[in-house]
Image: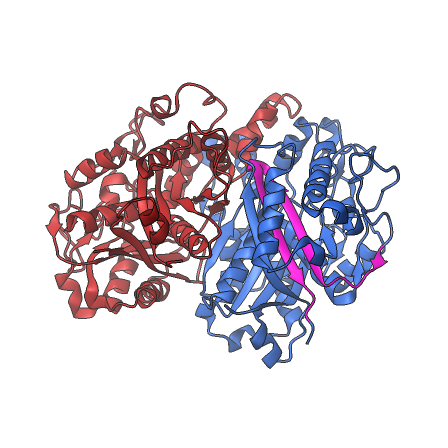
Amino acid sequence: MKRVAITGLGLITPIGAGRKVFWERLLAGTSGIATVASFDSSVFPVHLGAEVKEFDPKQFVRRGKLEEMGRGSQLAIAAARMSIEDSGIEISSYDSGRVGVSMGTTSGEPRLVERYNDVRKAEGLEAIPGDFLPQYPCNVIPSNIAVEFGLHGPCMMIPTACAAGNYAIGYGYDLIRTGRADLMLAGGADAFSRITYQGFSRLGAIAPERCQPFDKNRKGMVPGEGAAVLILEPLEDARARGAKIYAEVLGYGVSCDSHHMTAAHPKGDGAIRAMAMALEGSKKTTADVDYISAHGTGTPTNDRVESIAVRTLFGDRAGKVPMSSIKSMLGHTMGAASAIEAVACSLALDTGVIPPTVNYETPDPECDLDYVPNYARTTNPRVVLNNAYAFGGNNASLCLARYEA
Amino acid sequence: MSSRVVVTGAGVISSIGAGADDFERGLYAGTTGVGPSQLFGEGATTAEVRDFAPQNWLGPKGLRVLDRSARLVCVSSHMALCEAGLSQADAAEGDPGLGLICGTMFGSLHSITSFDWSGLTEGPNLVNPMAFPNTVINSPAGHAAIKHKLRGVNSTICAGLASGLYAMHYAAEFLRFGRAKALLAGGVEELCEESFLGFRKMGAASASGSIRPFAADRDGSVLGDGSALWMLETEDAACARGLRPVLEVGGFGSAHDAHSTSAFDVRADGATSAIRQALAASEIGPEQIACIISGASGSRAGDLMEARALRNVFGDLLGGIPVSAPKAAFGEGLGVSGAFCALAGGLALHRQSAPPTAGYKESEFGLRLSAEAQPFQGKHVLINAFGCDGNNAALVLNLRT
């Protein structure tokens, strides 16, 4: 098995695009949450959203035709282009059949569904355009990336909802370490949509004023959007080409609660097993973990269960391992979330600084860990876990480590 | 730990039969599931699962919240679990080593469209929140996990028409890595008004309402639906349970055309590469393939592309290898089609007989197709799954002796 390096980071988020801007703003505690702008939210009882602002897809999409793809694909291509540029690789120097794409998402291209229904309502079903269906397949986002960059390798979407980014990065890691691919573009993407908003609103899950993960007064999550793509390659190749290595992927773990479609297992059963499996595959123990990037959506139940899961697995060490939720700033970017968080983990390992949980004011006795309140901290982590949980009872934890030459 | 991954059970529900035995009978009788639609009425033609009564397998409880995809995959997983002897119906708690890898192409399209439509027409604050979980693409797999106590890996895999084969390969890899004990793997696709309408609008639907794979006068496909899953385990694990499985998941190959997300690349580079990779991964040459299960479904460009890929790989050998295009029977199942074809390939190996291509009369490409079953002798079958979305995959199945 080969060792796997992360050598490129590209992302577009509610707090900005590109590795540098993202990291500066994240460490400064910048919030990307604002009143929803892409549709009229006045019909809803809540109005906060974490949208990507000032996105000009023409800057990123060069080969594909913008009018033939949804926003999810546009965001994903933007992240992929930034990641390739960040890595310094020349895609054309690779055997394109050995360069693949593995992406995650919750909803794929939900805005096409909105358009379908808008046309249906205004003009009737026969007015649905012929390009609707071909733009929608759940795998259209990675396919659009493959077309944009001429990549002929394995290409798939793993739409395991809000844990999808971790699944996709994990599978990209599998393809590299087994030698099935020489280079993988792996990550996640999701576009903001009234559908997702309506759903979380009806579940009563959206925070009315701000996102406060792990705070006693937390009132919910904030739907968001974005995309992140990481470049994965064999560590030996990265070293040979003198690449910047942000982090090494050590392993990952996945599990299913098999309990409820939307509610987490009350004792964190699946979350515990995913973390344990990730550590086992990484040949690490809880004693090695220096930082946890929490799923931390800000809903009362999710944050409590995640804290219970970490407490159960880590025992006495639980409170000594800092664990923060960058969703406090980015909102919940759905299928992109764990990929964006994997970028944050990579940068924490590379720079030694861990990002904060902002809006943290009142400790909750049921969430009694160190959530890195409000200010970034220099801790020089060596091994980190990136947690992600999802509808369907899906859990995925990714284990990354600092690369030391 | 053996790296061989074997099949220890199958579950299938399709327009030609429910359950592996029924599916086998329908397939080898040369019948077709293409016919009048119950879902769309008014003279519509599909290869849908008709008279679908999930309560026959699942009982009446808890079905109301499930969409068609979830019901289909809950039924197929029930069948595969039972056949493999791994049903957990009576267990207090599920085995954390048991999971599900489910391929799909359009996933929750109908549930998400209905949820949005409900908001548009009734107002967003009156929408049923219970319908929201069904909008996520992995919801069928999640429902099946709850219903059957599957606590291990639960992944949904989307790779267009190749989704089913991708899912089987993904599952096989997870088993080889020791991340699971036994995995259901395959696919599901539901027919819905959005896919049915969209397929017609994009010009892919057969005007004559029939699937004539590789025929000179083929005029498009007819959509089908259903679910097909295998139970996969390592050979060691299966033998330790006292089983003697004969069907092994062999080499897999995949390639994206990177040409278009809506048109076949008729140069067939990706399809050719996928087949070659699958053979190489199986450490066999083209002369060892005894039967080919084609993904052809009557598409003008798609069938041409597959014929070219086969010619590229097999050359003059091609005239001697029986080919079956079973989509003539169970329709173009999109994300489940690769899994349907894999099950057909497994049956072919068992019976040493290529399934009939329903209604077959002639081929434009000199392929050895037949309306009758074609006996063969051999240990390796090739399954193809190529799509106009650019994804191509091929899988080899091996007979263990």
Main SS, magenta residues: strand
Tell me, yes or no, if residue B39 can be seen here: yes
- The foreground one among B367 and B14 is B14
A229 over A236 or under it: above or below = above
Q: Which quarter of the figure has residue A82? A: bottom right
For the C terminus of chain A, give its image quadrant: bottom right
Q: Which quarter of the figure has residue B311? A: bottom left
A264 over A402 or under it: above or below = above
Q: Chain A is shown in which shade?
A: blue
Residue occupying the point 71% across, 49% down:
A52
- The foreground one among A253 and B111 is A253
Q: Confirm whether the magenta stretch covers residue A32.
A: no
- The foreground one among B278 and A288 is A288
Residue occupying the point 56% across, 76% down:
A237
What's the magenta region?
Answer: A376-403
Q: Is residue B173 left or right of residue A236?
A: left
Q: Chain B is shown in which shade?
A: red
Q: Picture coordinates of residue A72 (x, y %)? A: 59, 49
Q: Is residue A88 left or right of residue B343?
A: right
